[in-house]
Amino acid sequence: MDLSQSNGTNLQIPVIDLSHATAQTADKLIDAVSRYGFVFVKGEGLGFTSQILDDTFALSKSFFASPIEEKQTCAISANNIGWSSMHTENLDPKNQKRGDFKEAMNFGEFIDGKAQQALAPAIAPHETDIHHFYDLCHELCIKLLKLFALGLKIDPFKGGEDFFASRHDTSKGPSGRILRLLHYPAVGKDESAFDNVVDIRAGAHSDYGSLTLLFQRAGQPGLEVLSPTESWSPVPVYPPGTESDAFPPILVNMGDLMQFWTAGVLKSTVHRVVFPPGESEDRYSIAYFCHPLDKVEIETVPSEMIKTRSEMNKQQNGETITAEGYLKKRLAETYGWGKAQSTL
Ligand SMILES: O=C(O)CCC(=O)C(=O)O
Ligand SMILES: [Fe+2]
């Protein structure tokens, strides 16, 4: 099978309304992420509004349109935060010679309301807004983590609903979470080097953390998910039934750490971003990569649904790994970063 081609089949990723979440909502979520690794969520009370999304995307657009010298003032550092220019990141080094044709701005954790890296002039005046967006993303992740724990029927005497959420409680310590603005520029028709070939903009990969939130824009599709039959399925921006919503539902996917933690019960699915040939509009997206606290030990989840498969979680030497150790290992594998500090 030619994995570079899209086959056009839609995966029908479920859309779940979190407005009045119950145990039944939790079961539906678990069903979706154990099947697809992806789920759309929407609902009242999540804090996201059309205005907030429009403003954050407008900020992203103005940052990426800034002169290169300004963007270079916040160039990416070895701890994975800052601006990465076109072709810097190669998410699929086995199959791609060149890095992805995209640029990104990664924000690490805010400390006392301050970003931990330099901010370019387009962003500096909006530090508080970015911080607010960051917080909304984290609150949604906590809500989802509680529902996952509920759906997995985690032993109430061993953390119950709070099992995952308490391990992501950022008031207790640092974590590797990242808010990422992404820009995929359109390539003019005459310059297109991609005629008749799929123009892959984010190489095939799975995410590293516990879960990822993805915000897409109307009219800017491109995400594809590798289906269990090993074909690429496009993910719509507005899945069926949401077409008249004020803004697209938020796409949630599991990261590799969550798959590892739940012994494969919750799936981390390979995905990529492709650009339609001749598309003249740039694509912008925003991702929030949620991670447990650095010092959290990724120990067996006390759930009967997971126990049977949990022995896979032991490292070869029988010790558990921390969230920080896991992330460093993955970054070192991809970028050759932090090898010296890696705990593995
Ligand atoms: O831009 C997108 O839609 C997806 C980006 C992505 O998968 C990533 O940055 O990990
Ligand atoms: Fe991703």
Image (tube, rainbow, N blue to C red):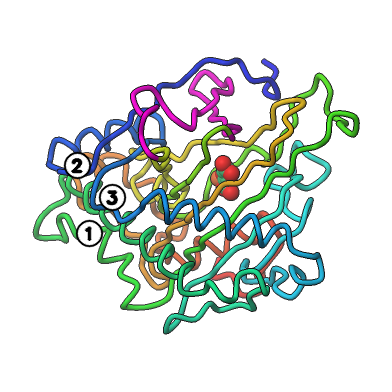
Crowdedness of circle 3 by 10 Å Cα count: few (<14), some, many (20+)?
A: many
At x 69%, y 44%, the residue is 184
Determine which residue is flagged by label 2.
Answer: 151
Residue occupying the far front of the picture:
51
Helix, strand or loop under label 1: helix
**Which of the pair 262/139 is nearer the observer?**
139
In the rendered image, residue 342, in percent from the top left (x then y), is placed at 59, 70
Q: Amino acid at mark 3?
A: Leu
At x 15%, y 60%, the residue is 158
- In-image side of 198 versus 190 (left or right): left
Determine which residue is flagged by label 3.
Answer: 144
**Where does the magenta region start and end?**
220-246
At x 53%, y 71%, the residue is 126
Name above or below for residue 191 compared with residue 340.
above
Does the segment drawn in magenta span residue 77?
Answer: no
Single out the mark in the foreground, 1 or 3. 3
Q: Which numbered disc, 1 or 3, marks the residue that appears first in the sequence?
A: 3
- Using the numbered discs, state the Cα–Cα distance from disc 2 to disc 3 in whole angstroms: 10 Å
In the rendered image, residue 49, in percent from the top left (x then y), is placed at 36, 51
**Which of the pair 322/124 is nearer the observer?**
124
Determine which residue is flagged by label 1.
Answer: 163
